[in-house]
Image (cartoon, rainbow, N blue to C red):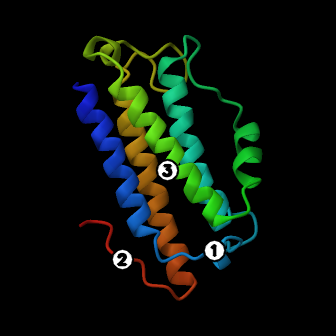
């Protein structure tokens, strides 16, 4: 897998995510459809921090950090959609830079043993980022509809 192409794909994911959630406003930051669900701000931050999680896990000799309670605490602390969107930009930009700096051999190395994608090539984790981001992009369009907003089509 070509690292530069994978990096460009990450930036495309960011654009699709931003476009499909662009109708959400700062005043929607604390909206959540039901008790126990993430707020708009937390959900956007969750996507950003999950991009970090995938990138860190791809290159860690011990694999992915499975302390999900700690992760939830971090994204639930984000109260502002503006701040969460800044995290999206930071996370995807960093991910693209990290991946672009790797060789094809680096990207073909297997992920470490463990419960998350054991033994598959590192580049396969990019597909995990894509699936996870698309899943939450769809959830945010539902949030938008519940707020009476019309999310734009994500595709140019």
Position of 45 with respect to 59 (left or right) is: right
Position of 103 with respect to 26 (left or right) is: left
The label on residue 26 is 1
Q: Quadrant of residue 124?
A: top left
Q: Quadrant of residue 105?
A: top left
Q: What is the total number of numbered labels drawn onto the structure image?
A: 3
Of label 1 and label 3, which has the lower sequence position? 1
Of label 1 and label 2, which has the lower sequence position? 1
* Residue found 49% across the figure and 58% down from its top: 136
Residue furthest bottom in the image:
148
* Residue found 58% across the figure and 50% down from its top: 87
Q: Label 1 to label 3, Cα distance in Å? A: 16 Å
**x, y percentage for residue 88?**
52, 51
Q: Label 3 to label 2, Cα distance in Å? A: 19 Å
Nearer the camera: disc 3 or disc 2: 3
Q: Nearer the viewer, residue 131 or 3?
A: 3
**x, y percentage for residue 65?**
64, 26
* Residue found 35% across the figure and 46% down from its top: 11
Q: Quadrant of residue 35?
A: bottom right
Q: Residues within 10 Å of mark 2 (few under 14, many from 20)?
A: few
Q: Residues within 10 Å of mark 3 (few under 14, many from 20)?
A: some
Name the image quarter holding the N terminus. top left
54 lies above or below 121: below
**x, y percentage for residue 101?**
36, 22
Of label 3 and label 2, which has the lower sequence position? 3
Q: Label 1 to label 2, Cα distance in Å? A: 17 Å
Nearer the camera: disc 1 or disc 2: 1
Q: Which residue is under mark 2? A: 152
Q: Which residue is under mark 3? A: 89
32 lies above or below 102: below
């Amino acid at each position: 897998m070509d690292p530069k192409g994978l990096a460009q794909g990450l930036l495309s994911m960011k654009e699709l995510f931003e476009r499909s959630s662009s109708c959400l406003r700062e005043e929607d930051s604390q909206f959540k459809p039901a008790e126990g669900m993430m707020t708009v701000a937390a959900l956007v931050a969750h996507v950003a921090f999950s991009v970090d999680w995938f990138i860190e896990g791809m290159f860690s000799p011990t694999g992915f950090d499975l302390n999900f309670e700690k992760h939830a605490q971090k994204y639930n602390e984000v109260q502002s959609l503006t701040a969460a969107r800044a995290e999206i930009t930071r996370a995807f930009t960093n991910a693209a830079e990290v991946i672009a700096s790797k060789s094809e051999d680096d990207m073909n190395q297997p992920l470490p043993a463990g419960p998350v994608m054991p033994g598959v090539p590192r580049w396969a984790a990019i597909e995990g980022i894509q699936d996870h981001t698309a899943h939450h992009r769809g959830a945010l369009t539902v949030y938008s509809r519940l707020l009476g907003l019309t999310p734009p089509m994500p595709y140019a």
